[in-house]
Image (tube, helix red, strand yellow):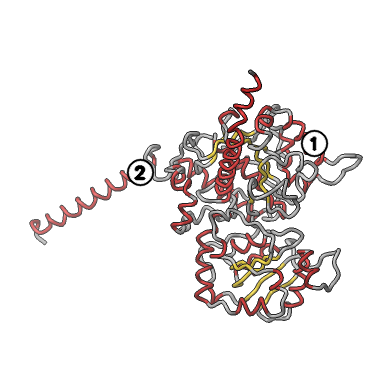
Amino acid sequence: MSEKNMQPSRFLFCLISISMFILILSSVFLLQSSNSSFIPGSVFRLILANNTLAYFQTNSISNSDRLPYLSSPTSLIDTRRPKSRTRERACLGSYSNKMGALGEGSGKVCDSNQALLKVFMYDLPPEFHFGLVGWKGERGQIWPNVSNASRIPLYPGGLNLQHSMEYWLTLDLLTSNTPGMVRPCIAIRVMNSSQADVIFVPFFSSLSYNRHSKLQGREKVSVNKMLQNKLVDFLMSQDEWKRKGGKDHLIVAHHPNSMLDVRRKLGSAIYVLADFGRYPVEIANIKKDVIAPYRHVVRTVRGDSAPFERRPTLVYFQGAIYRKDIGEKFDESSILRQGGAIRQELYYLLKDEKDVHFTFGSIRGNGTSRTGQGMASSKFCLNIAGDTPSSNRLFDAIASHCVPVVISDEIELPFEDVLDYSKFCIFVQASDAVKEGFLLNLLRGIKREKWNEMWERLKEIVHHFEYQYPSQPGDSIGMIWEAVSRKISSIRFRLHRQNRFRRSQLMGRTK
């Protein structure tokens, strides 16, 4: 080939080489720049720390024994935000309006003026919080260092996890003041209580009940009861409590038996609960308190969620069926009065159906994994009232993309003021569920198109029921803080109305 013909080829080759060099150089610059990086260094460090930890936990420690920092070991693999419907996105407005660029990974510390909720947290001694998980800091150290994910104390595994809300909320507040941590700007910890919207009480009450409610050795008072009494003495002596009678205080008591000895004394506070099943209405009610989702114990289905055709089981239930204080057979009115007894009646109605899985089960052995697999291969998953109106099965079903069937007349649902559960759950009254043939006829009559609508909606809202560290846009932690904010607004409204004439009356008395 002549030299004249080779000149255009050489020119084209040089042009392509220079372009590739410029492209590579600009990409390196963008990745390394702290101000314009697509992925900040703090995010890389968090991803590496969390996924490395999850790997070792998955391979060397049973999931039922240790807590992963994320709600499941693969939580950071799928970072896509599920789509939300326009109406409910508007109801969750603070995520789109308040979070701004922070939730997209800016790495900036949340400004208290941008946060939806300003929270003052008492510096209670570790015996009330991380000391209960075995953490021991340096002399005089109250809180663990949350900037290093590998050093954060783990919450005990097994069924303890389902009531671990206070752990996640406390971590989130500590993280809100930690430089470089990426999280939504929903709630931020402030150090001056006069600037706070709410006063948070960092007592791990559910863990205290689960681990320390029984007398040990020569104890005359259990550790759980002792801590509750010490907490009351502390709160009653605080100016923050006296200021509004505790109405702006937030106490997490998610286990139905937590705070049992002092819940009446502290009943003016906002409680974070699983339901109202064991509370009189004057102590806990929907006007002032927040219902929080259980932390599901099965893994969240990621990626390939089985469609209608690949779910051979029509109805799934696995758990406690028999109750010790109830006989084998009951009349319908007895079933409805005693709540959890309906499980036994439904067992007799459904156990012989070929496309129904209704058996006793527990988390022992590989029980949690088997339950997750069973739910993920079922079209409908039963959530039946037990000793309390709510149970973790509802949230296990949501995590498995199995359409929940709720049979619990007194159940309270998390975030129901912004989520329409009827779009992804089926509700059946207890009196109808125990009628022979009613439940199966109802579920078998639901066509694939209708089931697909609910299945798609489950995949859209599942992120609202995840607890993770650090918190992510729209997860359970942010949803709880938003629910608290709405309660605070309502409480502030009532207090302001009460003050309309109180001030003038006080002024009249001083004349």
Name the kind of residue labelled 1 in the image: Asn
Mark 2 or 1, which is nearer the eye? 1
Secondary structure beneath dot 2 equals helix
- Considering every residue shown, the one lying at the far right of the view is 218
Q: Position of residue 245 (x, y in %)?
A: 68, 34
Q: In this rendered view, identify the residue nearer to me: 137 or 286.
A: 286
Mark seen at residue 47: none
Quarter assignment of residue 424: bottom right
Q: On the picture, is 470 further left or further right than 331?
A: left
Quarter assignment of residue 126: top right
Quarter assignment of residue 346: bottom right
Q: Position of residue 310 (x, y in %)?
A: 55, 75
Q: What residue do we see at 52% from left, 51% from top?
A: 474
Q: Position of residue 154 (x, y in %)?
A: 67, 45
> Label 2: which residue?
28
Q: In this rendered view, identify the residue nearer to me: 81 or 248.
A: 248
From mark 2 to mark 1, how far is it between C-alphas? Answer: 58 Å
Q: What residue do we see at 53% from left, 65% from top?
A: 423
- The residue carrying pointer 1 sits among few (fewer than 14), some (14 to 19) or many (20 or more) residues within 10 Å by Cα, namely some
Q: Is residue 229 above or below residue 463?
A: above
Quadrant of the image containing the C terminus: top right
Residue 370 seen in this snapshot = no
Q: Position of residue 445 (x, y in %)?
A: 58, 79
> Label 1: which residue?
229
Q: In this rendered view, identify the residue nearer to me: 150 or 385.
A: 385
Name the kind of residue labelled 2 in the image: Val
